[in-house]
Structure formats: C-alpha cells, structure tokens
C-alpha cells in the first residue's frame, strides 16, 4: 500500500531512470511488441537483440518493449534511443536485419540506412 | 473432471463465458462436449438449454470436435480488399480442406472469422492464440510447414 | 542573380569534420568542374542535419535527396549518376521518403501520446511520464460533480461511433442514489477496420485504467468492468497485469490514498460476436447470456447490468479523461473544432502507403490524413473512395476529400465518422465487391433477435450477389435502398439500422460500378 508521498518518490525515480544520462545506459533499444509487431515477427527480433546484447556483453545497452506507434505496415519496428540524438526507428525488421543493426549501429554507431523508416 | 477450472470461478452465471473458454482451450480437440455442458450446468445451476444458447451464439465456441490448430482467417472488408479470398484458396489447397472442416490427422481446422483488429497488416489470420499478418500465398506454406515441423 | 539547377547542401559538424568533409567537398568541386557542371550546380555549407554516425551527409535540392556516409571515392559516381544522368545513387540514400511523407504527430496526441514510447507492462514508466497525476488530483482535490462539469465543459463526445456527449451521459447516472453503480468499458472492438482501442490497451493500459478510475469516482461507482472481445489476447493479458500493478501500488483498491474511496476493476471477456459492441447486448453478454440487445428505455445509465445504474463508455473516450482532468477543459478545447473537440484516432487501411494508425485533431480533412499521416496513396494511384466508419459506415467519394472530418461536418453530407476506421480504395477497386463484402459481414453478424435485420440482410445479400454474378438490374438497386430503409425503420438495434449507410452511399456515389454489372 502506497501513500501519495510514495507515489511522488516513484515518479521522481522513474523520471531519473528515463533520462539516460543519469544512468550508465548509453543506448536504449525499444521493440514494438503490439499485436501487429508480434504478428510480423517481433518476438524473433527481440530474441535476436537480447542474444546479441548477451553475446557481445554490452553492459551499457538496455532492451525494452513498447506498444504500437502507428506504423502497422512497417512492423516489427525497433527504436534506438541515445542521449542528445534523434530517435532512429528501424522498420520491417527481421532477425537478420536486427543482427546487422546491432553490429553496425549499436556497436559501431553507424546507421543502417536501408532499414531506417523514421527519425524524430 | 472440470474441478480445477471450476475452482477458479464462483458458481455464477456471469462467469459462464470464462468457464466455457477455459474448458474449450484445455480440450485437445478444442470444443465443448455434451458432458462438459452438463457439468457446467450443474455447477452454476443454469439449464443446459441456456448454455447451448450461449455456445451457439458466439463464434469462438464449438460444440463439435476440432483440430489441434484452429486457423481463423479474417473475411471482413479490409482483409477482403487485400486479397483474403486468395489466401483462403491457398489454405484450402495446401491443407486439402473444406471450410469448417478438420484435416484427417486432426492437425488443422479451417474457419473464417470477422475482423480481428489487425487491419494494418491485412490480410490476417489467427492460428490458436497467434496472429499472422501481411499474408501472402508463400507465407502460408512457411507457416503451415513450420507448425507441421514442430509437431513432429 | 545566378540560376542554379541544383543546390548541394553539405552538413558541417564535428562528426562530418572528423570524417573528412572538407576533403570530400573539394573532391566534389573538382568533379563538377571536370564535367562542366560548376555553373549549374551550387555547393553550400550548412550545419548538422541531425543524423548521426553517418559521417558526411549531403542533401540535393530541389529533389531533396539525402546522401549519407559519403566517401571521396563515391564522388565520381554521384556526379555522373545524379547530375549527369539524373539517376539517384540508391546505395547512399538515406531513406527519407518515409520521413517526409509520414508524421507521427506525437505533439498533438492525447490518447496515444505514450503508445510506442513506454513499456506498457511497467507502471513506473507511466507514472514517470505524469501518469496517475489526474487520478490523484480528482480524488484529493475535486468533488465528483466538478469532474462531471469539467468533462462536460471539455465537449468530449463518445468515440465509439455515436458521438454522444460524455459529460452529459455521466450526469444522468451521477445523481442516482443506488447501493451499487457500475462503469463498464466497452472494449468489444469489432467494427471491421477498427483497432484503435486495441492499440490503447496494448500500448498504454494504465491510461485507460486512470480514466476509468476518474469516471467511477465522478459517477459514484465502486465497481467497474472492462469488457474485452475474446480475440484480443494481448489486451487482456496487459490489462490484467496493469490492474494487478495498480492494486500493488495502492492506486486501486480500498481507501485509495486515504480518501475513503474504494474501487475494484474487473475484466470480462467476449467470445466473438459483433453485436456485443452494442451497449445493451454487451451487458447481456457480461451477465453470461447470449449477447442480444435489450429494448431502450430503460437506458443502461438508469438500469443496466444486473439492473444497476451502469455507465458504458468506449475505450478511446475514457482514455481522453486523464488529460482533461490534468490540464483542464480549456486546454482540451484547443484541440479540434467547435462542437467536436479533442483529437480522433483513425485506423488507416487499404491502398495507402503506410497503413496503421494516426491521432489527429478533430476536423482534419481526409486528404490531409491520407497524405500526411498515411504516406499518401500507394503507388501514387488515384483515390476512388473510402469506407469511413467501418462496415456500419459510408462509402465516400473523392468529392468529400476536403470536408472536415468531425461528427457535425460529416453529418451535413449524410456521412458518419463512426469508429474512425478508414478503408482507402484506389481506382482499381470494384465497389460491388466491397459492398458485397460489407453485406456478407452483416449477414453473418445479425444476431437473430429481430426479423427485419435477419431477413433484410439475407435479401440484401441475394441482391448484391446478383450484381456480382452479372445478373442485376436497375430495379434491384432501388430495392436494396428500400430494404435498407425498412431495416432502419424496423430493426431492433443499431446493427440492422446501419445497413442504410453503406448500401445507400455505395449505390449513390458509385452507381457506375453497379450499372457496369447489369446484363
């Protein structure tokens, strides 16, 4: 059972965590795990990304999920979020594309232009 | 026989749809048998006729044995526009199966359904709990073969 | 002034300087000189393009082609292919077509502002973005009637299709004295082409819960239900998790925030029946019956589920409530148009480049929705028509492309906004086929309670099938409209009453398609 004061603390803590700068996270990878995403293979993409993070021992990368942003036809969709840089959205992802994205973008900081569908 | 399921729900009519879903999902042939209807009727104390009334009203329920994998292809206008008829034809050919029929090995049942709400990826179908989108005839082969392969 | 046929903008920032942008620029000048293009093509230095990790980027105007990660050795190819032959070097292009043609519109979003950003299974992310602040404000600082009045002032109207004012609906139930009142969320989203509620529930379940909590407090209900269609497995799963988390955090349960207010939220599921989207049929289904509609009055607000006063609201409607309470009605009315405030979530399908979803201000014309928020027409095909509002919607012709999309404006053209489903069709689409598909849907979903609907759908199906088989005649068209009109007059519930909309609009707006099928 939480009080209002507890809720306030949780809010502040969550806000801190969402700012990447304050944590040790360099890159946040967000995978769209709505029905459209899952229907087009997002689970496979997520598994691949998790495997890559583990096998490359990327300790400054966190992987998380979200719902749909509206690009049903581009699913599975993956966002790469870095502090102070625009969010890059990759679309129509597959396990193979995810591996390439991990190697080129997440590890070497180089966009895989062919798969980019939006940047905000 | 359904004690485990009944234990989860109080014996009230408002839980009927939940109970029927669970009985059906746990039956290897994904249907609700006469015996089940009798037991549910006794448990929540409503007439069997009421339960049959409910069973036959909702399209997700079946009173006949079905296959291990229920294919439900959307036939609503958005999927229709994107070629669901061709997908249906392909499914019938691949499985050598008529509508609402089950393959001899009990692996697949082919059904049509109304909009599944995944229209951005039309045409769409569900196999049991999983949704498959952006369907093409080639994809049907891959999906069916994969399920067959997993069964072996 | 000198006239250049093209301008090349080169991005200068730390990344590009490191990648040798100066050297590349020099190489470009040399190459242009060599091909006698220096007089036609201008090179300009500019700041960062905002892309990152892409080395040297350059943008060519007027065509707005962006080349990224350009190396010295790429220069001859760019000059020869792009500037001499007019062919873009695809391997270097940043995929900007989509960026230009698609707008997420996150800044104006109200109900889907978090979807696609936060982890829906983590309550703390929702809280971190200001979630449950409105609930706190409502419960601690506001009286129930103040909330009802705020929602009334916001002008929020039901997003399920009918567009009934939400605050007004609440004001019928709020003053009723009863031992138990209920709020029910209608999440039986079955209108073909509609999946907005699914996205809200999957992408931001706590927003629905927060709105529902506020609604309950406003009308004095201590029990609430969310009725979700059985096919929406992921929604059920995520909402169950969200409810459990809210209870764990003391946001939901007994004596919430020591206010003395208790609330419990439960989930009910359907089993595949379109008619259960009608509120009284939904209530029947919740009670464990066949989902057949009840006669009104009494309206559910007075006598609903288990004969208790029951407010039934759509998912999208309720998802607007937290923002209204948090920011005030005046803020809300800055969105949309007079008489139809706020935003509307549209689900876009069919022959557009980017099917999916968009949330835009009420009153945004269809042309804008297609061009800016759905990537335009697929393969640049011609727009023929759109089925707006789902199967129980209207076939719009291109004449209405620039009409404001809101309840009032569309009504003037005998059209409806409905659930916000928009099925776009190009000039290849045969409207006979589409109407056949719509009628087939209704024929299957007619619940069997009343004969005007059951029988009417059967006859309509026979008639439209005649055209499909090339056996129709002009009298059949008149008869179809007549039958739909009779169904409107005589059917028990909105299901049978809806047929007039697709049937009449298809026949009147696309008569040619039917006449072509006459033998």
Image (spheres, coloured by chain):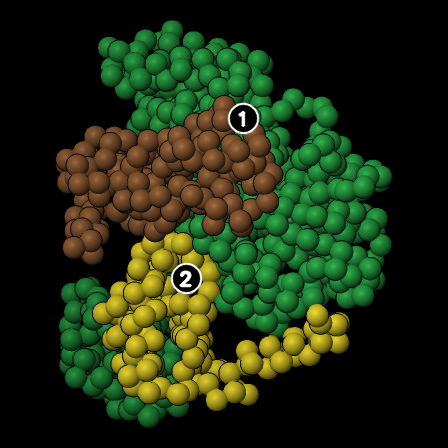
Chain colours: A yellow, B brown, C green
- Direction from residue C89 to residue C250 in the image, left or right: right
Residue at image position (37%, 58%) is A37
Which quarter of the figure has residue B122?
top left
Q: Residue C103 carries which label?
A: none
- Cα distance between the residues tagged 2 and 1: 42 Å
Q: In the rendered structure, the residue with mark 1 lies on which chain?
A: B
Residue A8, horizontal then vertical, whole percent = 71, 75
Q: Do labels 2 and 1 share a chain?
A: no
Protein chain holding label 2: A
Q: Is residue B48 positioned above or below C18 on the image?
A: above
**Left or right: A112 as drawn, with respect to B97:** right
Give the labeled residue for mark 2: A33
Q: In this view, does B144 lie to the left or right of C423?
A: left
Q: Where is residue C173 in the image (x, y as percent from the top left)?
A: 78, 38
Judged from the image, the secondary structure of the residue bearing numbered disc 2 is: loop
Q: What element carries label 1?
A: loop
Q: Quadrant of residue B103?
A: top left
Q: Is residue A83 visible?
A: yes
Residue at 16%, 65% in the rendered image: C85
Q: Position of residue C179 (x, y in %)?
A: 81, 41
The spot of residue C378 in percent (x, y) is 31, 47
Front residue of this view, candidates B78 and C251: C251
Query: Which mark lies nearer to you, 2 or 1?
Result: 1
Query: In the picture, which quadrant includes the C terminus of chain C?
Result: top left
Find disc 1 in the rendering and name its residue.
B47
């Amino acid at each position: 059972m939480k009080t209002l004061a507890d809720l306030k603390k949780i809010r502040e803590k969550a806000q801190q965590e969402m700012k990447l700068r304050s944590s040790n996270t360099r890159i946040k990878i967000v995978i769209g795990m709505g029905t459209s995403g899952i229907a087009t293979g997002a689970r496979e993409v997520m598994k691949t990304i998790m495997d890559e993070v583990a096998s490359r021992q990327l300790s400054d990368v966190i992987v998380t999920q979200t719902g749909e942003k509206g690009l049903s036809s581009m699913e599975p969709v993956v966002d790469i979020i870095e502090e102070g840089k625009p969010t890059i959205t990759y679309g129509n992802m597959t396990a193979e594309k995810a591996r390439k994205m991990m190697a080129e973008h997440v590890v070497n900081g180089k966009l895989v232009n062919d798969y980019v569908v939006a940047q905000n | 026989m359904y004690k485990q399921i009944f234990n989860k729900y109080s014996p009230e009519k408002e839980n009927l749809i939940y109970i029927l879903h669970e009985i059906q999902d746990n039956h290897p042939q994904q249907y609700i048998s006469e015996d089940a209807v009798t037991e549910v009727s006794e448990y929540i104390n409503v007439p069997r006729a009421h339960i049959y009334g409910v069973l036959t009203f909702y399209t997700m329920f079946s009173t006949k044995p079905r296959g291990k994998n229920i294919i439900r292809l959307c036939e609503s206008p958005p999927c229709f526009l994107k070629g669901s008829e061709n997908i249906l034809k392909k499914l019938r050919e691949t499985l050598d199966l008529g509508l609402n029929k089950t393959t001899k090995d009990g692996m697949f049942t082919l059904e049509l359904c109304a909009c599944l709400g995944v229209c951005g990826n039309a045409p769409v179908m569900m196999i049991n709990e999983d949704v498959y989108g952006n369907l093409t005839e080639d994809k049907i082969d891959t999906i069916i073969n994969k399920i067959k392969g997993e069964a072996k | 002034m000198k006239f250049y046929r093209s301008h090349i903008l080169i991005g200068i920032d730390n990344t590009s300087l490191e990648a040798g942008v100066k050297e590349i620029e020099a190489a470009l000048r040399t190459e242009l000189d060599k091909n006698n293009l220096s007089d036609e093509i201008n090179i300009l230095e500019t700041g960062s393009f905002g892309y990152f990790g892409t080395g040297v980027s350059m943008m060519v105007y007027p065509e707005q082609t962006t080349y990224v990660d350009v190396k010295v050795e790429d220069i001859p190819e760019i000059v020869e292919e792009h500037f001499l032959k007019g062919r873009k070097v695809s391997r270097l292009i940043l995929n900007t077509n989509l960026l230009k043609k698609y707008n997420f519109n996150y800044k104006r979003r109200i109900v889907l502002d978090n979807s696609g950003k936060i982890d829906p299974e983590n309550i703390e992310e929702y809280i971190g973005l200001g979630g449950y602040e409105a609930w706190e404000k409502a419960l601690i600082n506001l009286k129930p009637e103040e909330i009802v009045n705020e929602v009334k002032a916001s002008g929020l109207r039901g997003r399920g299709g009918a567009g009934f004012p939400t605050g007004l609906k609440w004001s019928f139930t709020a003053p009723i004295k009863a031992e138990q009142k209920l709020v029910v969320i209608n999440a039986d989203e079955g209108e073909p082409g509609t999946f907005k509620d699914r996205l809200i529930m999957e992408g931001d379940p706590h927003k629905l819960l927060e709105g529902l909590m506020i609604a309950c407090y406003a009308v004095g209900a201590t029990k609430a239900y969310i009725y979700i269609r059985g096919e929406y497995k992921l929604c059920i799963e995520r909402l169950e998790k969200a409810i459990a988390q809210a209870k764990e955090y003391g946001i939901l349960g007994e004596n919430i925030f020591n206010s003395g207010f208790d609330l419990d939220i439960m989930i009910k599921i359907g089993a595949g029946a379109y008619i259960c989207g009608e509120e009284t049929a939904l209530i029947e289904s919740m009670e464990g019956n066949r989902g057949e509609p009840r006669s009104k009055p009494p309206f559910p607000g007075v006598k609903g589920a288990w004969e208790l006063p029951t407010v039934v609201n759509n998912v999208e409607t309720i998802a607007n409530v937290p923002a209204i309470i948090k920011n005030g009605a005046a803020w809300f009315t800055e969105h949309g148009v007079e008489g139809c405030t706020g935003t509307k979530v549209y689900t876009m399908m069919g022959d557009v480049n980017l099917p999916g979803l968009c949330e835009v201000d009420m009153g945004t014309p269809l042309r804008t929705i297609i061009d800016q928020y759905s990537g335009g027409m697929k393969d640049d095909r011609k727009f023929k028509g759109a089925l707006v509002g789902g199967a129980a919607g209207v076939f719009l012709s291109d004449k209405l492309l620039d009409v404001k999309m809101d309840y009032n404006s569309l009504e003037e053209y005998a059209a409806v906004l409905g659930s916000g489903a928009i099925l776009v069709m190009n000039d290849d689409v045969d409207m006979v086929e589409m109407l056949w598909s719509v009628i087939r849907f209704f024929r299957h979903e007619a619940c069997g309670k009343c004969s005007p609907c059951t029988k009417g759908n059967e006859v309509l199906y026979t008639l439209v099938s005649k055209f499909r088989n090339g056996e129709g005649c002009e009298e059949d068209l008149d008869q179809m409209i007549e039958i739909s009109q009779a169904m409107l007059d005589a059917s028990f519930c909105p299901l049978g009453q809806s047929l007039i909309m697709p049937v009449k609009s298809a026949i009147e707006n696309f008569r040619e398609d039917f006449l072509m099928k006459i033998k």
